[in-house]
Structures are given as C-alpha cells and as structure tokens.
Amino acid sequence: MTLEEGRRVRLAADLGIGEAVTGEPGAVVGFLALGAGIEGTVERVDGELPESEEVREYQRLKALFEDYGHTMPAASRERLAAQLAELEPEWAAYRERGRRVTVRVRWDNGFVLDGAHQDVLTAL
C-alpha cells in the first residue's frame, strides 16, 4: 500500500495509548485506546523507517562475501559465512516487512497519531 497525503485510512488493530488519570497524583482510572476501524486522513508521510544496524551489517558482509569470498582463505570465508548466517534472521524479517514508512494521521474524532507505522493502517 502506498500512503500519501490526503489519503483516507482505517486503523487495522486496537492501539493502546496509555493510562487515563484524574487530577490526583497516581489516580489511574482506566486505559485509553484507539479502536480498530476508526478512520482518518493522512496528513504527512515521513518516509522510510531506517534500517537496523544488523541489516546494514548483513548487507555489508554479503557484498564482501560475494565480491571477494572466492579469494579469501578458507578460514576467513567460513568465519564470514558464519557471521552472515547469524544475521540472516534479521535480514529475512527486514525483507518480509518490505518498505515501511511512518505517517501522521488525523482521525475523524480529532485525535492525531504521529509516527504511525504503515502496517497498522489500511487504505480506504
């Protein structure tokens, strides 16, 4: 899904916001949440979420392995392969998520959700 300013969206899952308190210190009276199904309008698209350090390291090591692995001593090549295998789950999760962006949404009830990940929204 491509999100852009002005696009109508719906919250795909309940989103907990925090505790509801009264004016008395520490007097929690409930929990505030936005319910799934609430609709609103995208006000701003902030861009892609940054890659994690592990993803960047995987990309660096993979390029090194592909470009120079055939020229490395066997022990170095095996150590590099082991490092890649260790980072593989993080890389797979990153690829599965695909391009992720954050957005600012103004809900029809007046609430504003800023920095929301696109995977909690569905386009209308």
Image (spheres, rainbow, N blue to C red):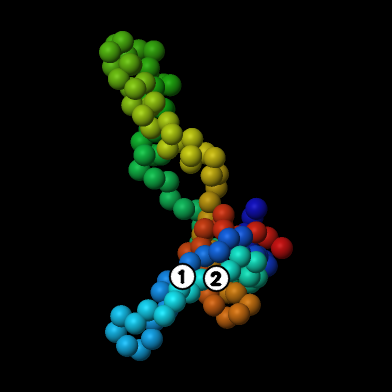
Instruction: Decide: is 14 above or below 83.
Output: below
Q: Residue at x 44, y 76 (%)?
A: 30
| Image marks 2 and 1: residues in contact by CB distance under 8 Å | yes
Do we see residue 5 in this rendering? no
User: In this view of the protein, which residue sits in the foreground, 34 or 7?
Assistant: 34
Identify the secondary structure beneath mark 2: strand
Label number found at residue 17? 1
Residue 21: quarter of image: bottom left
Q: Residue at x 48, y 39 (%)?
A: 93
In the image as oriented, which residue stretches furthest toward the top? 74
Q: Position of residue 14 (x, y in %)?
A: 55, 64
**Residue 9 left/right relative to 103:** right
Instruction: Decide: is 119 above or below 81.
Output: below
**Residue 6 left/right relative to 44:** right
Q: Residue at x 48, y 67 (%)?
A: 16
User: In this view of the protein, which residue sits in the foreground, 50 or 9?
Assistant: 9
Identify the secondary structure beneath mark 1: strand
Task: Name the amino acid type tagged 1.
Answer: Ile
Q: Residue at x 34, y 82 (%)?
A: 27
Sequence-wise, the earlier of marks 2 and 1 is: 1
Do we see residue 102 in this rendering? yes
Residue neighbourhood size for the residue with mark 2, other residues' Cα within 10 Å, grouped as few (<14), some (14–19), many (≥20): some
Q: Position of residue 73 (x, y in %)?
A: 29, 11
Find the distance from the CA under tag 2 to the CA under tag 1. 7 Å
- Residue topped by disc 2: 34
